[in-house]
Image (cartoon, rainbow, N blue to C red):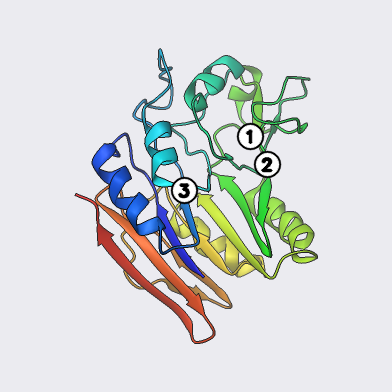
Amino acid sequence: MVILHTNDLHGKFGERQAMLVAEMKKSADFYFDSGDCVKSGNVGIPIGADPVWNWLHLAGCDASVPGNREFHVTTAGFRAKIAGAKHPILCANLVWNGRVRKPLQGDQETPLPESVTFGNVGVFGLMVPMVTERMAAKRLSAFLNLSPIETAKRVVDELRSKCDKIILLSHLGFSNDLALVEKVSGIDIVLGGHSHDRIETPEKVRDTWICQAGSHGKEIGRLELGNSGLKSRLLPLQ
C-alpha cells in the first residue's frame, strides 16, 4: 500500500503542486491531507471557496481532516471554510453543541463524517480541540470537540470489525499523537499535522507509525507499507 500525505499547507498549494501530486498519485493508492490546508486564519471567513479545494481535487485527494484554520464557531463560518471540498472531510471528535443542525457534509447526524472505508482500509479523522465542554467559548459555538483519546478508542473498535488496516488523519500535533497511541491500540498509521514537524523517519510507538510532512507545501510524504514494514520519504513540492 502506497500513501501520499500532506499537512498544514496554509494556502501554499497551487496548480504546480497539484500537478506534481497528481503525477505521484498514479503510482500510489491514496492521498490524504491532515488539515490547515486553507489560507484564511481561525476567525477569518472567506468570501468564496478557497482555491485549495480545487487543487486538492486535481491532485486526487481521497480524504482530509479539518485543522484549526478550517474550523469556525458558527455553522455558516464553518460551511464557508470547507465550501468547495470534493473529498470527504472527516472528524470523529466534532459534535453539535446540543442543537439540531443540517449536517455540513452528507446525511449523517454529526457535523462531519467520522470515518470512511476504502475496501479493507478504514480512515478516520481527529482535530485539535477548539471548543470543549469546559470552555466559556462553548456559549458561542455551534460545535464541541470531544476527547481525542476516548473518541479514537470507540472509532477504532468500530472499524476493526470490518477493516484490516486503520489510518488516522490527525490534526492534533506530534506530542498529542504520541500520547494518543500510547493509550489507543489498533491504529496502523497516524498521518499528523498541526505541529509542522518534518518527520523523515516515522516514529513507531507500539504497533503504530506516526508520520508528518512539515508545512506550507514544501514537501509531501510518501509511505510504502508492506510485509517488511514501513518505508518513508519526503519529496519536494517547491
Residue at image location 45% in from the left, 52% down from the top: 173
Q: Percent position (x, y) of residue 89?
A: 57, 39
Find out whether the residues at labels 3 and 2 contact each other: C-beta distance under 8 Å.
no
Residue at image location 68% in from the left, 44% down from the top: 114
Where on the picture, by quarter, is residue 117?
bottom right
Find out whether the residues at labels 2 and 1 contact each other: C-beta distance under 8 Å.
yes
| Position of residue 17 in the picture relative to residue 148 (left or right) | left
The type of residue carrying mark 1 is Thr
Q: Secondary structure at mark 1?
A: loop
The type of residue carrying mark 3 is Ser
Residue lying farthest left? Answer: 238
Earlier residue among tags 1 and 3: 3
Q: Percent position (x, y) of residue 31?
A: 46, 54
Earlier residue among tags 2 and 1: 1
Residue at image location 41% in from the left, 71% down from the top: 202
**Mark 1 neighbour class, 10 Å CA radius: few under 14, some 14 to 19, many 20 or more:** some
Q: Percent position (x, y) of residue 209?
A: 50, 71
From the image, tell me which residue sits under label 2.
146
From the image, tell me which residue sits under label 1.
132
Residue lying farthest bottom? Answer: 228
Where on the picture, by quarter, is residue 43?
top left
Decide if residue 95 is in sight here: yes
Q: Percent position (x, y) of residue 64?
A: 52, 44
Which sits in the foreground, 156 or 205? 156
Q: CA distance from mark 3 to mark 2?
A: 18 Å
The type of residue carrying mark 2 is Leu
Residue at image location 46% in from the left, 48% down from the top: 34
Which sits in the foreground, 214 or 180? 214
Q: CA distance from mark 1 to mark 3?
A: 21 Å
Closest to the camera, between mark 2 and mark 1, is 2
From the image, tell me which residue sits under label 3.
34
Which sits in the foreground, 235 or 73? 235
